Amino acid sequence: MKRFSQQFLLLLMLAISAPACSADSNAPRETLSADVVSDIRENTDASQDTASEDGRSNGEEDVDPEEKDAASADVEPKDATGDEDSGEDLGTPDVGSDEPDTNGTPENPFSGLTDGSLKGALRQTHRGHDDLGYDSARDFLFEYEMANNGPTGQIECVYTGRTAFVDDRSNAQSQHDYNTEHTWPQSRGASGVAKADLHHLFITDMPVNSRRSNNFFDDVVDVTWSEGGSKLGRNAAGETRFEPRDEHKGNVARAILYFSVVYNYEVNADEEAAMRAWHVLDPVDDAERARNDAIEGVQRSRNFFIDYPELVDQISDF
C-alpha cells in the first residue's frame, strides 16, 4: 500500500510539471547534446591517447615530420645496380679528374690496389679504346712526329737518333728508309687491335728495325752491333738481346709494361728486370706526356704508366 501511494504521488507531480517541461524542452536538450559531444570527444581523445601509449609500448615511436625528412635525407640513393652506396668506390677510378700534386704528377687513384686487382682496374680504363686501323695509326704517328720533333717536317729514329725531313709517311718509307717499330713484336702477339695501338709504336729506320727484329730487350754486355747508342748482342746470361739508347729506355719500358697489362701477356723474366731498371733510369718527361695526351685524343686510351709511374712498383710480376 505504501508503494502504491508513492507511485501515485509521483504520477501526480509529473502531470503538474509537464507543461513547464514542454516549454523548456529545447534548452535542456541543447545543453545535454553539448555535454554529450564534449564527453564523446574527451572519451575519443582519451582512447586515442591510450592507443598511442599502447603503440609506444609496442616499440613504435612518434616521429616529428622534420626529423622524418632529415632521416630520409641521410639515406643515400641506390646506384644503378640497385645496391645502396656503401661509400666505397667499386668502379673504375676516374683517371681524368685527378688534381696534380706539388710535383706536377697527378694523384694516383689506384694507390690501394696491387698485382691482379690493379691490372684488372687498369684494363678497365682501356675499355673505350678506339682501333684506328694500322694505316691510320701510322699516318698519325708520322704526322705527330713531323709536327712535334724539332723543326716542322723532321722525324727521328728512336734507336739511332738519325733524322730526316719528310713530306709524309709514304715519303719517309720510300725515300728515307724509315719504318714503324712495334715495341712489342707482332710475332709475339701484337696483332689485330694491338698491332695499331700507338702506345707501343715508334718511328725507326729500316736497318735498325730489322736488327732489333723480335729480340727481347735487356742490357747487352757482349756487343755485336751498335749505332747511336743502341746495341745488339748478348746479355749476361749469353742470350741475344737488344738494348736501346739511354734516352729511349724508359719509353720502351713503359710501352712493354703497358702492353703486358692491357693485352694480358707475360713479360720475359730478364726483360722484366731490365724494364723496371730502365723505367727508373729514364723517367717520364714532358715530351712523353705530350705524346700520351695526343694519342688519347685519337684512340681514347692512355698509357697509365706514363700518368702514374709509381704503378710499376705496385705490380710484383708482369
Image: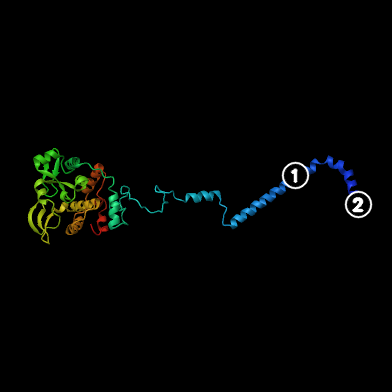
- Residue 309 x %, y %: 25, 54
**Residue at which label 1 appears:** 33
The quarter of the rendered structure image containing the C terminus is: bottom left
Q: Can residue 104 be seen in this view?
A: no
- Rendered residue at 66%/52% (across/down): 47
Under circle 2, the secondary element is helix
Amino acid at pointer 2 = Phe
The quarter of the rendered structure image containing the N terminus is: bottom right
Q: How many marks?
A: 2
- Residue 128 x %, y %: 28, 45
Q: Can residue 55 be seen in this view?
A: yes
Classify mark 1: residues with Cα within 10 Å, few (<14), some (14-19) or many (20+).
few
Amino acid at pointer 1 = Ser
Q: Going by the image, does 13 lie left or right of 35?
A: right
**Residue at which label 2 appears:** 4
Q: Going by the image, does 113 lie left or right of 204?
A: right
